[in-house]
Amino acid sequence: MKKRDKFIVFEGGEGSGKTTVARFILQTLENLGLKTLLTHEPGGTKLGTDIRKILLYGENIHPRTELLLFLADRAEHVERTIKPALAEGKIVICDRFDGSTFAYQGGARAVDFDLILVMNAFAKDNLVPDLYILFDVSPEIGLNREGKNVTRFEKEELDLHRRVRRAYLSMARNDDEHWAIVDAEQPLEDVKQKVLEIFKKRKII
């Protein structure tokens, strides 16, 4: 089979539907006979699973601590999961990556962007995704879609989620070479088809 390694990241605020669409895309690619891996952050490794529990359900975590935990998870994830899969020629779909760090810790928590830039580059060993897809949804809609498994991020004030959305849109609009935006307020089936169109347009499939 021809080597087709690609690294695709799905980003978005709470309740954007990206996780559901990621599973659909995984099944679609597998049906086409493509070697594919679906992973996620935080928690895409054994160590990352423990870090994920702290990040999603811990209490009173300082923003600097939060950033360092996410980056520790990313370093392990890149080395143990993502790089090996790419080396095998797989299309890797990752539910959240460093776009989330810049949106949440940078845009929402106001941690210095230049500092995040340097630390993130080290954590991911300068690995750059081929494409980020932003599932854009207003917090007012997204948060109301969430189920009963509420993390500490869903419990944050609405303004934080608005800052996250603004940060995401700023990144995506300023780098259309690496980012594509999907209106995630559309019906789910429409969102799925839009993502497939993006995959075809970007020659991923």
Image (cartoon, helix red, strand yellow):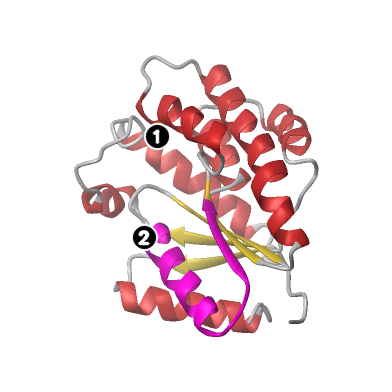
Q: Cα distance, mark 2 to mark 1? A: 19 Å
In front of the other: label 2 or label 1? 2
Q: Name the residue under label 1.
A: 160
Residue 118 place in picture, x, y as percent = 77, 32
Residue 197 place in picture, x, y as percent = 53, 82
Q: Can residue 124 be seen in this view?
A: yes
Residue 22 painted magenta = yes
Which mark sits nearer the N-terminus, 2 or 1? 2
Residue 16 painted magenta = no
Q: Does 97 sit left or right of 123 as displayed?
A: left
The residue drawn where x is 39% and y is 40% is: 161
- The kind of residue on which mark 1 rests is Leu
Q: Residues within 10 Å of mark 2 (few under 14, many from 20)?
A: many
Q: Does 116 sit left or right of 32 as displayed?
A: right
- The kind of residue on which mark 2 rests is Gly
The residue drawn where x is 61% and y is 60% is: 173
Viewer-nearest residue: 156 or 159? 156
Q: In the rendered view of the protein, which quadrant contains the C terminus?
A: bottom right
Q: Give the range drawn in magenta.
A: 17-39
The residue drawn where x is 50% and y is 39% is: 43
